[in-house]
């Protein structure tokens, strides 16, 4: 069929091909974008979930749920059981009672604090000691006091011989003179004279002196003074005292701390104050004490209505039962259950569990997932995606990726991609040249124009000077009558195998030759993807140029139709085959001489014989150039 279409010239319109290709690329890009979309991700996840055996099992489980199988049912049943428990009922009755409120207020009251303080005091050894003491007889009370101890001490000391002897001296009639003389100078004089008289000096003077001399002597004067003093009342009383048989006891105590202490004690014992204190002790009554007052205050509080009511309530069985449960695990469990039963979560769960199986399912996440899955599955976008994702619709796009592309979007040629000379002129000669059989000179870009994203290679009739290459004699200068242009990817892009295509309009200006072709390192191998002369030619040249053994495969078509519009000329190159296509229709194939080395692209216009003026200028228009390699 392909060859018949070619023979009949039934090539699809280029615009239709490009529109179809653009639409396909847009759709493919849309497919790629949608493949990454949240919506498709959601659908795929739901598809995996909804169509799983686990999902079906969960739906079955949801529909078969029973309230009696739930934890909520068990807790509600336990709650109802505890609600009927007499202890718990009593607990909450007491908890909400006025009696408990009164007791709680009472237990923080000042009165109770004072009562407990009094109770502690009445139970103290201090109180008990006072009460026992107050129950004694007056004599017993007195005997337990310090007063009694002082009196006993006084009586004992008073009976001692040394105290008695002391006071015998003090009470003696001569004691007054003794006391007055004791620290006087007169007593000292008497003592000194007595010592002198008794020393023997007076007796000696009496013996040694006559009577008259003696009476005039100092010894006599001292003797006389001594005798006079000895006869005085004070000295005689003094001598009486110190000669008393118990004077030594007196002398030991006189002005001592012991006698001073005794006299102080005696003064105290014989004082009115002591008598009053003793009377007060012996006549003391318990009713007059602070302890009695506190005891009465305690009894009054204990008998008051507030105390009796609260103490009675506190001792009651109901209150003791309340205390037993307060803070217990039983109450904690009950209140947790009550809180749970009264919660929105429990209410909603119970309402849900009492629904019909179908209504339960409608409230489940599974139902929402399945509903959303059906909604997505029914959407045009998902249906389109499922239809095209595994189809062969995008195989050409999937299997190939662009390796080179030129759309001539700039108003200047991209020199990074293209050179405007033959490759060897660019790399070795660094100048433009033409081949020996060519009539035109390639002007290194002057015959190129870009406008509206279309490249024109223009052949003109004009003089030019340049070089010519002849394999036999090499380069030589020549004057040309024609100029034209050439672009090549020899420096920037080479590829082995793949798809090579360009959208070109060849203006039929015979004998101007417009060509889209490929070369490698040498002139052979050489592939004409599309070349127009009198006819449209596609060809392949291979062999050994040194041995003059060149072979070729050439196919031709009528050229008139291809000069009226743009066509897409393509070469599909595999290791085993070359396939030439125009607008997707195969026009020729070759399995011999298939190149096995990378090749580069050339687009050019040339003249091989002179032309008349009406033919020129002639142009070849290139809209775009693209090359592809396998995507994998």
Image (cartoon, grey):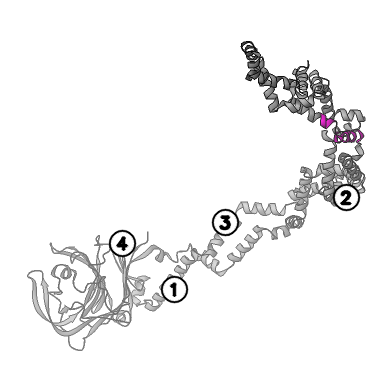
Say which element carries label 4.
Answer: loop
> Tag 4: Cα neighbours inside 10 Å, few (<14), some, or many (≥20)?
some
Tag on residue 449? none
* Residue range corresponding to the magenta coloring: 266-284
Q: Earlier in the sequence, mark 1 or mark 2?
A: 1
Quadrant of residue 135 within the rendered picture: top right
- Marks 3 and 4, how far apart at CA: 41 Å
Helix, strand or loop at label 2? It is helix
Q: CA distance from mark 1 to mark 3?
A: 32 Å
Horizontal side of residue 613 vs 220, given as left or right: left
Which residue is located at x 79 percent, y 50 percent?
A: 76
Residue placed under numbered mark 1 in the picture: 23
Q: Which badge, 4 or 1, is on the more N-terminal residue?
A: 1
Q: Do we see residue 227 in this rendering?
A: yes
Outermost residue to the front: 212
Q: Main secondary structure of the magenta part?
A: helix
Mark 2 surroundings within 10 Å by alpha-carbon count, few (fewer than 14), some (14 through 19), many (20 or more): some
Q: Quadrant of the N terminus?
A: bottom left
What residue is pinned by disc 4?
A: 574
Query: Which residue is the site of mark 3?
Result: 48
Q: Secondary structure at mark 3?
A: helix
Give residue 99's mark: 2
Q: CA distance from mark 2 to mark 4?
A: 105 Å
Q: Looking at the figure, which quarter contains the C terminus?
A: bottom left
Judging depth in this view, the residue of 503 and 149 nearest the camera is 149
Q: Secondary structure at mark 1?
A: helix
Based on the displayed image, in which of its 4 quarters is residue 189 positioned?
top right
Q: Position of residue 369 (x, y in %)?
A: 62, 60
Foreground mark, 2 or 4, reads: 2
């Amino acid at each position: 069929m392909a060859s018949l279409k070619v023979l009949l010239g039934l090539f699809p319109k280029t615009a239709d091909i490009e529109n179809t290709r653009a639409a396909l690329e847009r759709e493919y890009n849309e497919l790629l974008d949608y493949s990454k979309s949240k919506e498709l991700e959601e659908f795929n996840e739901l598809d995996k979930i909804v169509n799983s055996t686990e999902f079906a099992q969960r739906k079955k489980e949801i529909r078969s749920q029973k309230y009696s199988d739930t934890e909520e049912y068990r807790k509600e049943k336990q709650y109802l059981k505890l609600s009927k428990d007499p202890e718990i009922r009593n607990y909450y009755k007491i908890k909400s009672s006025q009696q408990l409120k009164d007791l709680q207020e009472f237990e923080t009251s000042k009165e109770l604090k004072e009562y407990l303080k009094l109770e502690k005091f009445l139970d103290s050894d201090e109180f008990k000691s006072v009460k026992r003491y107050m129950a004694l007889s007056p004599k017993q009370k007195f005997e337990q006091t310090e007063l009694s101890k002082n009196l006993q001490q006084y009586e004992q000391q008073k009976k001692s011989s040394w105290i008695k002897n002391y006071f015998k001296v003090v009470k003696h009639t001569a004691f007054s003179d003794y006391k007055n003389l004791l620290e006087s100078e007169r007593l000292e004089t008497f003592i000194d004279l007595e010592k002198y008289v008794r020393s023997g000096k007076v007796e000696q003077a009496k013996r040694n002196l006559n009577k008259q001399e003696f009476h005039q002597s100092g010894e006599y004067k001292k003797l006389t003074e001594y005798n006079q003093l000895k006869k005085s009342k004070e000295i005689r009383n003094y001598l009486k005292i110190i000669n008393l048989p118990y004077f030594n006891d007196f002398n030991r105590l006189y002005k001592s701390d012991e006698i001073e202490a005794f006299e102080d004690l005696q003064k105290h014992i014989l004082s009115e104050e002591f008598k009053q204190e003793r009377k007060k002790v012996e006549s003391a009554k318990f009713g007059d004490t602070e302890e009695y007052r506190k005891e009465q205050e305690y009894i009054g509080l204990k008998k008051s209505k507030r105390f009796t009511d609260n103490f009675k309530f506190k001792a009651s069985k109901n209150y003791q039962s309340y205390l037993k449960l307060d803070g217990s695990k039983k109450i904690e469990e009950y209140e947790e259950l009550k809180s749970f039963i009264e919660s929105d979560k429990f209410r909603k769960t119970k309402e849900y569990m009492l629904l019909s199986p179908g209504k339960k399912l409608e409230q489940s996440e599974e139902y929402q997932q399945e509903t959303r899955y059906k909604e997505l599955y029914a959407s045009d976008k998902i249906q389109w995606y499922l239809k095209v994702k595994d189809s062969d619709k995008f195989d050409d796009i999937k299997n190939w990726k662009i390796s080179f592309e030129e759309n001539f979007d700039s108003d200047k040629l991209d020199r990074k991609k293209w050179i405007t000379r033959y490759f060897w002129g660019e790399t070795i000669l660094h100048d433009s040249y033409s081949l020996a059989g060519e009539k035109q000179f390639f002007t290194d870009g002057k015959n190129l124009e870009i406008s509206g994203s279309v490249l024109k290679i223009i052949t003109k009739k004009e003089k030019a000077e340049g070089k010519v290459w002849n394999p036999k004699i090499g380069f030589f200068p020549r004057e040309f009558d024609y100029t034209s242009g050439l672009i090549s990817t020899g420096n920037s892009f080479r590829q082995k195998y793949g798809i090579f295509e360009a959208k070109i309009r060849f203006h039929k200006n015979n004998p101007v030759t417009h060509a889209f072709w490929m070369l490698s390192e040498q002139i052979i191998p050489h592939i004409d993807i599309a070349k127009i002369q009198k006819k449209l030619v596609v060809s392949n040249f291979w062999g050994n140029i040194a041995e003059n053994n060149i072979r070729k495969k050439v196919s031709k078509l009528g050229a008139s139709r291809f000069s009226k519009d743009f066509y897409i000329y393509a070469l599909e190159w595999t290791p085993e085959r070359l396939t030439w296509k125009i607008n997707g229709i195969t026009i020729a194939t070759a399995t011999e001489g298939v190149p096995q080395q990378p090749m580069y692209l050339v687009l050019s216009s040339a003249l091989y014989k002179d032309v008349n003026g009406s033919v020129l200028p002639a142009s070849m228009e290139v809209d775009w150039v693209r090359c592809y390699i396998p995507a994998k």
